Image: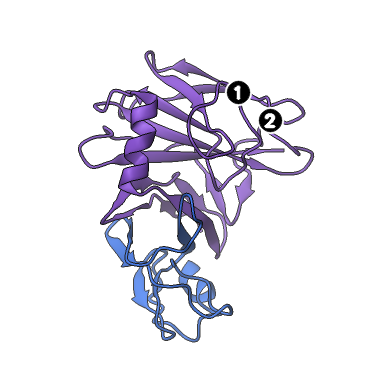
């Protein structure tokens, strides 16, 4: 316990995904199912977003727990860094929606793009009937730090993921 | 501290005491001690073998999901 975990995953034919940083809170840290995008699908995502590939792309995964039964109709506002944008995923799995659908982790509900690599993210997440779990809340044997490595999307097909636990 | 209990269900892996040490499990799959998960295709949800998970200086290559009683590994 008390060990910082900061993994990333990738391989031939797939985008590289930086997983959320976490402190091990127990003896069994379960990352669960981690969806990986084939490079062709990642290219499609970027074509849809028309993102600046010198900037980072961060998927936002929302975990429903407790009284939080749905994330539909929620909003994510990017307060910083300047220039970053947000788009929501449709239930078909494409970043084409202007409204948040009820998509819970392990798949992302939203994607932030044009994020300055290494910049601090300041988000406001507003989901009706849900509140954000307090900092330090253990989930699946880990305490999420709210941080993740961000890199330019290209070259390398790089993406990052952040997990927000709602209750 | 993590490793021994972490792998207790996986038939006696080579625990080394480091929280994220990598060692080979006796039941055939790779592990990063202290954390586990399963990489799946975004659209099909099918498990992906042959991808690499790296954490610090340790890395493992995912293998097809092992026996259901031994899921504490990256698969």
For disc 1, the neighbor class at 10 Å (few under 14, some 14 to 19, many from 20) is: some
Q: Earlier in the sequence, mark 1 or mark 2?
A: 2
- Say if B55 sits above or below A152 in the image: below
Q: Residues within 10 Å of mark 2 (few under 14, many from 20)?
A: some
Q: Give the blue chain's letter.
A: B
Query: Disc 1 versus disc 2: distance between alpha carbons?
Result: 8 Å
Q: Which chain is drawn using purple?
A: A
Q: Which mark is residue A99?
A: 1
Please state the chain letter of the residue tagged with numbered disc 1 in the rendered image. Answer: A
Question: Seen in the image, is A146 located left or right of residue B50?
Answer: right
Report in which chain the residue with disc 2 lies.
Answer: A
Residue beneath the point at 20% across and 37% down:
A155
Mark 1 and 2 residues: CB-CB less than 8 Å, in contact? yes
Query: Do the residues at pointers 1 and 2 share their chain?
Result: yes
Q: Nearer the viewer, residue A10 or B72?
A: A10
Image spot of residue A113 (x, y percent): 39, 26
Q: Position of residue B48 (x, y in %)?
A: 40, 63
Q: Residue at x 46, y 71 (%)?
A: B3
Q: Quadrant of the C terminus of chain B?
A: bottom left
Residue at 41 percent across and 80 percent down: it is B25
Residue B24's spot in the image, x, y percent?
Answer: 35, 79
Query: What residue is shown with label 2?
Result: A72
Q: Is residue A97 above or below residue A16?
A: above
Give the residue at x 32% y 37%.
Answer: A43
Residue at the far right: name it.
A67
Determine which quarter of the picture holds residue B8.
Answer: bottom right
Asked if residue A152 can be seen in this view, the reply is yes
């Amino acid at each position: 316990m008390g060990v910082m975990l900061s993994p990333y995953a990738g391989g031939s034919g797939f985008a590289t995904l930086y997983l959320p940083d976490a402190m091990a809170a127990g003896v069994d840290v379960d990352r669960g199912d981690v969806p990986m995008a084939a490079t062709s699908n990642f290219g499609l995502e970027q074509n849809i977003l028309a993102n600046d590939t010198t900037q980072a792309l961060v998927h936002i995964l929302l975990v429903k727990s407790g009284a939080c039964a749905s994330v539909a109709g929620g909003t994510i506002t990017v307060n910083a860094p300047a220039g970053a944008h947000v788009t929501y995923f449709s239930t078909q799995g494409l970043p084409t929606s202007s409204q948040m659908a009820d998509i819970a982790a392990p798949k992302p509900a939203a994607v932030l793009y044009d994020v300055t690599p290494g910049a601090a993210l300041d988000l406001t997440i507003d989901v009706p009937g849900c509140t954000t779990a307090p900092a330090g809340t253990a989930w699946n044997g880990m305490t999420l730090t709210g941080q993740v490595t961000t890199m330019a999307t290209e070259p390398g097909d790089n993406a990052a993921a952040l997990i927000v636990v709602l209750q | 501290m993590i490793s021994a209990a972490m792998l207790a269900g996986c038939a006696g892996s080579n625990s080394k005491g480091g929280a994220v040490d990598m060692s080979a499990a006796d039941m055939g799959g790779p592990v990063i001690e202290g954390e586990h998960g399963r990489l799946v295709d975004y659209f099909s949800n099918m498990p992906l073998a042959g991808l690499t998970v790296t954490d610090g200086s340790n890395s493992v290559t995912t293998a097809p999901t092992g026996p259901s009683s031994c899921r504490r590994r990256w698969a």
